Image: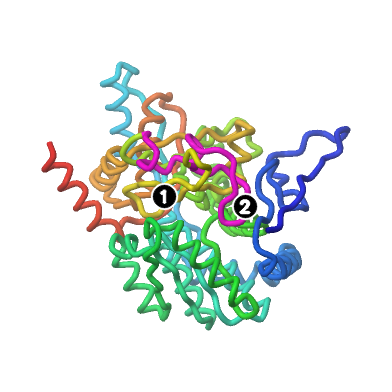
Amino acid sequence: MSGMTTFQADPKAPPPKLSDVPSPEGRFGAFGGQYVPETLMAALAQLEQVYDKVRHDREFWDELRGLFATLVGRPTPLYKAERLTAHAAELSSRHGNGGQAATIWLKREDLAHTGAHKINNTLGQGLLTKRMGKKRIIAETGAGQHGVASATAAAHLGLECDVYMGSEDVRRQRLNVIRMRILGARVIEVDSGSKTLKDATNEAMRDWMGSVDGTHYIIGSVVGPHPFPMIVRDFQSIIGTEAKAQSLRYIGRLPDAIVACVGGGSNAAGIFYPFIDDAKVQLIGVEAGGRSRSAGDHAATLSFGAPGVLHGTLSYVLQNSDGQTADVHSCSAGLDYPGVGPEHSYWKDSGRVTYTAADDAQALDAFTLLARTEGIIPALETSHAISEAVRLAATMKAEQHVLVCCSGRGDKDVDEAARLLTQRDEQR
């Protein structure tokens, strides 16, 4: 196994901005690095070299921005959720808080092509794949949105695509499995372990180790060994860059708070990063609280985890008493991951971002709430953020504003949500 030493800053230098990461060694404070077999070090070095070349390459970014505009449909709208805001005000009144609430705004990533933010990253990494002269991509997926986005990028760019997906997630996300296959991708079911996202990632890593010369692994979140967390964050930061400009246009200033769900953490990193040095903007990440706080019943890594190594990076990880990766649970296939991106761990320890959790019941309530107040069916991942945003807005003043990253749409979740809601009704 290979690691990287922690970057030692000049003690006489002024404190760096929180945005000035990772270090040249791939560290976000104490987190990050490369903990991978030697067989992958050359591929990571190649990826880092190619990305270093394109980071300031106008031709590359013009090509990507062109795809964002013509294929993805960017910029995605900033939407004023008036009836959801009214619900928050009613909640405030019932709890004796004066009946006022902050205005809730949605950054509509659910309207991006393929139905979620994931396409921002897969198109960027697809272009990097072609720059490296590789013809095949692989991906892992839980909720299926990254798988669909990878298959879409591969189809558009003429690449071969294999997607690893746990068999339990195949059951829960059948619609996205069909979409991937229609787009030409091969979906490889994983029956090991919990048959979910962690296990799919394990198998994708094994594939990459054996096919690295001609294959690029498009990691779907801000996880994995350096430079993946930086690359995914940079491609996803289009969300926050647009949201900042839209806030200045429609609100007249920056929002008071931004809320996003956190599994691995790509949509949250994407919307948080352009605001990370704006200290007056409160940033809140919402993890999967699952069924309870008991081990194995949730996926709230930053609330209950400890530093450890998972999938090639040092970050917060949910672990059992033996130090092994713990089992996790969430009603959302996209949030049941036992780790989190190293930059989120850095933000947690710095105190810049507050992390909380919404449980399955709260997420399901928010799922139907947004549908019935605004006519928008959110992904179950997004529903966790909606739940926290409504709770938060009800504690704030009427002149304040809360921005939520509406990271994905709920088409993929309607069958599973209906099953869970029916099950809950029968138990009452």
**Residue 273 visible, this orientation:** no
* Residue 166 within the magenta-colored segment of the rendering: no
The C terminus sits in image quarter: top left
Task: Tell me where residue 348 appears, x and y as whole percent.
Answer: 58, 36
Occupied quadrant, residue 16: top right
State which tag comes first along the sequence, 1 or 2: 2
Q: What is the quadrant of residue 49 in the picture?
A: bottom right
Of all residues, the one furthest to the right in this rendering is: 12
Task: Please name the residue that numbered disc 2 is placed on.
Answer: 313
Disc nearest the viewer among 1 and 2: 2
Judging by the rendered image, the residue that carries numbered circle 1 is 335
Q: Are marks 1 and 2 in contact (CB under 8 Å)?
A: no
Which contiguous range is marked in magenta? 293-319
Label 1, label 2: how far apart the Cα atoms are? 18 Å
Tell me: 240 left or right of 392: right
Residue 140, position as x, y percentages in the image: 47, 65
